[in-house]
Image (tube, rainbow, N blue to C red):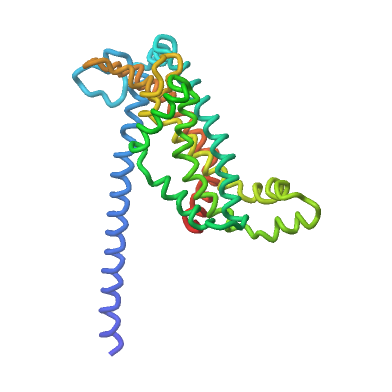
Amino acid sequence: MQGTLEAPTESRSWLGSSRGRSKRMIVYATIAFYLFVVLLPLYWMVRSSIAENDQMYGTAIEFFPKKFTLAQFDAAINKWKFGLYLSNSLAVGLVTTILTTAMATLAAYSLVRLRFPGRAALARSVLFVYLIPGGLLFIPLFMIMQRLGLLNSQLALVVSYQSFAIPFCTWMLIGYFKGIPPEMEEAAQIDGASRLQSMWLVLLPMAAPGLVAAAVFTFTLAWNEFLFALVFITSDSFRTLPVGLAGLIRGDIYLWGPMMAGSVLAAIPVMVLYTLANRMLVQGLAAGAVKG
């Protein structure tokens, strides 16, 4: 009786393990496919930046370049002024990040810790402002910059980017500040610290992952933005990297080599930033998403 009952159990176990292996193979194949789709453009960008022109414009597709050269980087930096565009992007990105993080921190702190009428409605309106597409704000911002005489200046980009970044960073920091007990700041104030000192010495160190996530988000937004940088800046000496890269497309002529070399140069700062801040970035985004 027992033998007749054990045989089907082994059969089900064998079928179960077979189905498990099939599912794992499907999962691995799916992951491999998406990794290939995501990584292939990045590989082709690096490959094109170190290939010679005759290999790049040939009819045959060569997955690996026959000869390696840095001539494309030399042309991008010295002939097409990517060093200037890179420094402009760094200046705009860093100033925007510092100002946005400071303003979003003060705004989030006031909405979480201070008590005043309309506080909840104001907090919700911050998120609604972020949800407005940037294209709808393009014309009003252009008119404001024109009236203020800020067109064709990097300050116009800094002010415009803050209109997108501050609402999102404020909403994210609201969620993070809510997770920090106010009793810790109150204890510091009982010991004689002012409100600003308790915020600086107690709250901000504990909210470091949220601040890092807000700063990385702002820098990435300023680094990659194209439309406002294209329209607000008309002088070549103030252009940023995305606009400088687009300048290498002239009619039906595509300067692939310098363009790919410039793309590699543009990707390096962001990759380094995300690598260094990876852990804090994940913690900050997760806290803002759950507690906001």
Image quadrant for the N terminus? bottom left
Residue 269 in the figure: left or right of residue 27 = right
Q: Which residue lies most toward the bottom here?
A: 1
Q: Is residue 67 above or below residue 177?
A: above
Specify the farthest residue to the top. 79
Does residue 203 appear to the left or right of 20 in the view shown?
right
The answer to whether 229 is drawn above or below residue 163 in the figure is above
The residue nearer to you, when weighing 149 against 82, is 149
- Locate residue 228 relative to residue 87 in the image: left or right: left
| Residue at image coords 70%, 46% | 196
Q: Position of residue 198 (x, y in %)?
A: 72, 50
Q: Residue at x 47, y 33 (%)?
A: 270
Residue 21, quarter of the rendered image: bottom left
Residue 203 percent location from the top left of the image: 66, 51
In percent of width and height, residue 111 lies at 57, 53
Q: Position of residue 251 (x, y in %)?
A: 23, 16
Q: Nearer the viewer, residue 212 or 18?
A: 212
In the displayed structure, would residue 112 be above or below residue 93? below
Location of residue 249 (image quadrant)? top left
Res 233 → quadrant = top left
Q: Residue furthest right?
A: 191
Residue at 25% in and 85% down: 4
Q: Is residue 138 above or below residue 197?
A: above
128 or 247: nearer the viewer: 128
Q: How many marks?
A: 0
From the viewer's perspective, tell me whether residue 77 is left or right of residue 106.
left
